[in-house]
Image (cartoon, rainbow, N blue to C red):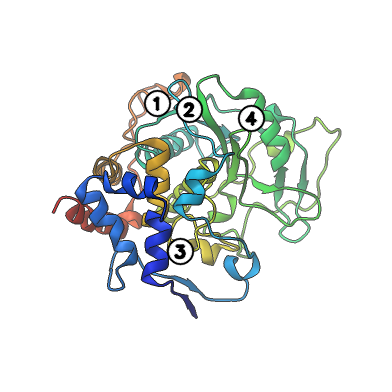
Amino acid sequence: MQIIRHSEQTLKTALISKNPVLVSQYEKLDAGEQRLMNEAFQPASDLFGPITLHSPSDWITSHPEAPQDFEQFFSDPYRKTPSPDKRSIYIQSIGSLGNTRIISEEYIKWLTGYCKAYFYGLRVKLLEPVPVSATRCSFRVNENTQNLQIHAGDILKFLKKKKPEDAFCIVGITMIDLYPRDSWNFVFGQASLTDGVGIFSFARYGSDFYSMRYEGKVKKLKKTSSSDYSIFNNYYIPEITSVLLLRSCKTLTHEIGHIFGLRHCQWLACLMQGSNHLEEADRRPLNLCPICLRKLQCAIGFSIVERYKALVRWIDDESSGTPGATPEHSREGNGNLPKPVEAFKEWKEWIIKCLAVLQK
């Protein structure tokens, strides 16, 4: 295992900058917020640790890229920021997300509630679910894993056409695996920062995807025409577990983070670290490091205390916690399924420690 450690001064400059304007901006933050963010360059901090590399296939080793400090983020001329008339994140589900309609609807409500807390201060709205056929996307059977895959680029074009006027961004979520081009094996997600659109798949987050008993394998693709999407009818969907929900929340917030202009983090253990494989994705935390937290706060303008409190409420709330966010067709007396948040308990303890620092 390799540990990536930056000097205290390097981390301090990455967070605060040496630009007098940005230093002044930092000094105007609430005293508690400064106290928490200063943990970035405290070697003994138990809140923010260094990045660890476990194999040559990990992201930083196999995808060298320049790090992005706060000043570079702030000065990026191509960065998109929510405006008063574009402060909504739209979520579009593609295909079913659960084995029953009720599970599918609850799952998307849980994700919506999480996004509302994570991107605190923005509106998060659901669009009516659509079947795969509505996107007119290309699809294939993966030669290696024998599962169905849909073309990420085609989905992005579909989402761009559907993007509402008040949208900061629109993101598609699906339980069907994605591929970006014929030569690629798969991709967890893909986004266009300029268009403010993204598509993310949770297919590989089920506990059985890489097992011999995986039920989503297709022996042969029988397609009568390019417009025949019947193979997706009743296609296999993994069981919604606490781990799958946690992995989905990570991917969704990581990729929306990119749409805000946050690049892959190379400073500290952070949600915005890149990941090449599931094991690496599981290692990265749900939280943002102080440098990326300052970037997101700069883009949205939230109180860090209120954001953390909203995340704790989401974990504590056994139901969806998003009243009024349900699509019209699902407002029937089905009752709420309990939200599987067991995998989030450790993170909740971490947030409570952060709140203690903020409110000292």
Q: What residue type is labelled 4?
A: Leu
Q: Is mark 3 on a helix, strand or loop?
A: loop
Q: What residue type is labelled 2?
A: Leu
Q: Which sits earlier in the primary sequence, circle 2 or circle 4?
A: 2
Depth check, mark 3 against mark 2: the one in front is: 3
Residue nearest the viewer, comparing 292 with 184: 292
> Where residue 227 appears, x then y in whole percent?
80, 30
Q: Do the residues labelled 2 and 4 touch (CB within 8 Å)?
A: no
Residue nearest the viewer, comparing 157 with 226: 157
Identify the mark at residue 267; answer none if there is no mark. Answer: 3
Residue sitting at x 50%, y 41%: 260
Q: Distance between the residues labelled 2 and 1?
A: 7 Å
Q: Are marks 2 and 1 in contact (CB under 8 Å)?
A: yes
Q: Are marks 3 and 2 in contact (CB under 8 Å)?
A: no
Q: Which sits earlier in the primary sequence, circle 2 or circle 1?
A: 2
State the residue position of label 2.
126
Depth check, mark 2 against mark 4: the one in front is: 4
State the residue position of label 4.
159
Identify the mark at residue 325; answer none if there is no mark. Answer: 1
**Neighbourhood count class around disc 4 (C-alpha, 10 Å): few under 14, some 14–19, many 20 upward:** many
Q: Which amino acid does label 3 sit on?
A: Trp
